[in-house]
Amino acid sequence: MDEPIFENVLNPASSGYRPQQPGSELVNRQLRQLLESLIDELPGAFRTVFMLWAVEHCPVATTAEIMGIEPARVKARYQHARLLLQERMMEYSNALGFAVHECTGHRCDTIVCNVLEKLHVDD
């Protein structure tokens, strides 16, 4: 696993994502600021690995060389950093009272229709 899981953590617009709802640019900006502050809170070794691999797109071998550690340690630190970020994001979402996996509106309807179609279920 030499490539990051996602294209660009801090700039979803660069990966082809285009906001479609009013106010989504503001929400994306706020989420970006939150994510940046949570990355800043990561312990040093985890933050460095996360920044090099996920944000700067350095290969595992390069990240390992820069940090003077084994590639397996880079992968472990990266996974741990992702877990820490995920936990903190969930804490924030729970504190604000919104569901991260909430499904509403047109997007939800499209997903449900596609799933039902795959299952061959009629209306």
Image (spheres, rainbow, N blue to C red):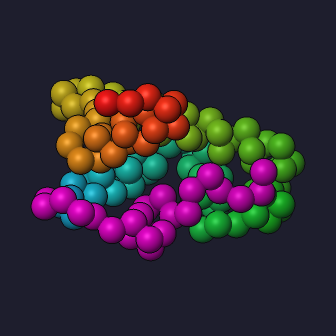
Q: Which quarter of the figure has residue 55?
A: bottom right
Residue at coordinates 36% horizontally, 36% vertically from top-left? 112
- Front in this rendered view, residue 86 or 113: 113
Q: Is residue 93 visible?
A: no
Q: Is residue 36 visible?
A: yes
Vertical placement of residue 54 versus 87, above or below:
below
Q: Which quarter of the figure has residue 81?
A: top right
Residue at coordinates 30% horizontally, 40% vertically from top-left? 108
Vertical placement of residue 58 versus 117, above or below:
below
Residue at coordinates 71% horizontally, 59% vertically from top-left? 3
Give the image location of residue 75, x and y in percent.
Answer: 74, 44
Q: Is residue 24 magenta?
A: no
- Count how many numbered circles sit on residues in the image: 0
Give the image location of residue 51, x and y in percent.
Answer: 57, 58
User: Predominant secondary structure in magenta?
Assistant: loop
Q: Residue furthest right?
A: 70
Give the image location of residue 1, x and y in percent.
Answer: 78, 51
Vertical placement of residue 19 versus 14, above or below:
above
Q: Residue furthest left?
A: 22
Magenta range: 1-23
Give the image location of residue 40, x and y in percent.
Answer: 44, 50
Q: Is residue 49 left or right of residue 105?
A: right
- Front in this rendered view, residue 35 or 8: 8
> The C terminus is located in which quarter?
top left
Q: Is residue 20 magenta?
A: yes
Q: Is residue 22 left or right of residue 54?
A: left
Q: Is residue 67 left or right of residue 117?
A: right
Residue at coordinates 13% horizontally, 61% vertically from top-left? 22
